[in-house]
Image (cartoon, grey):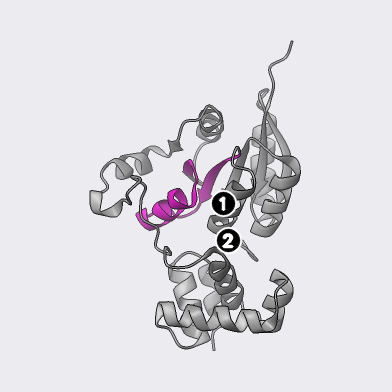
Amino acid sequence: MSKKRITVLLAEDHMIVREGFRKMLELEDDLEVVGEAQDGRQAVALVKKLRPAVVLMDIAMPRLNGLEATRQVLKAVPATKVVILSAHSDDAYVKDATAAGAVGFLRKQTSSHVVCEAIREVQKGNTFFSPTIARRLHQLDGKSLDRAGRPQPRNARLSSREAEVLQLIAEGQANKQVAAELDISVKTVEKHRQRLMEKLNIHDTAGLTRYAIAAGIVESSVQLTIV
């Protein structure tokens, strides 16, 4: 009797990167790619439908970034394990990822052997971080941890919906577009926008966009759209 495969969902907005990971994982007898998502919102929907054991989740994705997608994935399907993939591995990104519920964090430059090892380890219920990241986590000052011993996120003041609205605003969407994307009223979007500005003490869209970039909610290329 063949061993049950570990099902994996790939969430990455660059097709060529997704194809590379898929081909890499297809070489492993115990791993199976069951779906691919090109943005965070699609990732959440596919997890609800396919219920994969593990999600390899990019952080910087359109419509819904990987951190917020991770929160929504784990709320909908708590049994799924999320491993973050990112081109960045500074402490702030790692803190945000672990606070969102990710049990692994790998740089995209990580070798295929390590990626496969990470998938197997988190499936067993363990955590897995790239070696250099793991060493830094052990060195975290206690002041950087919350009461549960988890790293404090940078965006702790924002609710899940506020983070969604902030990302869409930073991506250049008008209130009406945000309302349609989130299936809420324009008036509700306006309230969220106002609350964001009050919480962050930022009073214009350009400022919100800069904050979203600094917090890793959107990619820095969005800066090009700021007038």
Where does label 2 land, which residue? 65
Residue at 47% of width from left, 64% of height from top?
A: 216
**Residue 88 covered by magenta stretch:** yes
Where does label 1 land, which residue? 70
Residue at 32% of width from left, 49% of height from top?
A: 147
Q: Nearer the viewer, residue 79 or 98?
A: 79
In the rendered view, does 109 fall on the left or right side of 44?
left
In the rendered view, does 47 fall on the left or right side of 161?
right
Question: In what quadrant of the picture does the N terminus appear?
Answer: top right
Q: Judging from the image, what secondary structure is the residue with disc 2 in?
A: loop
Above or below — where is 53 with respect to 89? above
Q: Nearer the viewer, residue 61 or 186?
A: 186
Of the two numbered discs 1 and 2 in the rendering, the one whose residue sits closer to the viewer: 1
Above or below — where is 55 with respect to 62? above
Residue stretch in magenta: 80-105
Q: Amino acid at mark 1?
A: Thr
Rendering coords of residue 115 (x, y %): 54, 36
Rendering coords of residue 23 (x, y %): 69, 37
Rendering coords of residue 150 (x, y %): 37, 47
**Mark 1 vs 2, N-terminal side:** 2
Rendering coords of residue 178 (x, y %): 67, 76
Above or below — where is 83 with respect to 189? above
Question: In what quadrant of the picture does the C terminus appear?
Answer: bottom right
Q: Nearer the viewer, residue 58 or 199?
A: 199
Q: Quick one: label 1, few (<14), some, or many (20+) residues within 10 Å?
A: many
Q: Quadrant of residue 170?
A: bottom right
Residue 123 visible in the shown view: yes
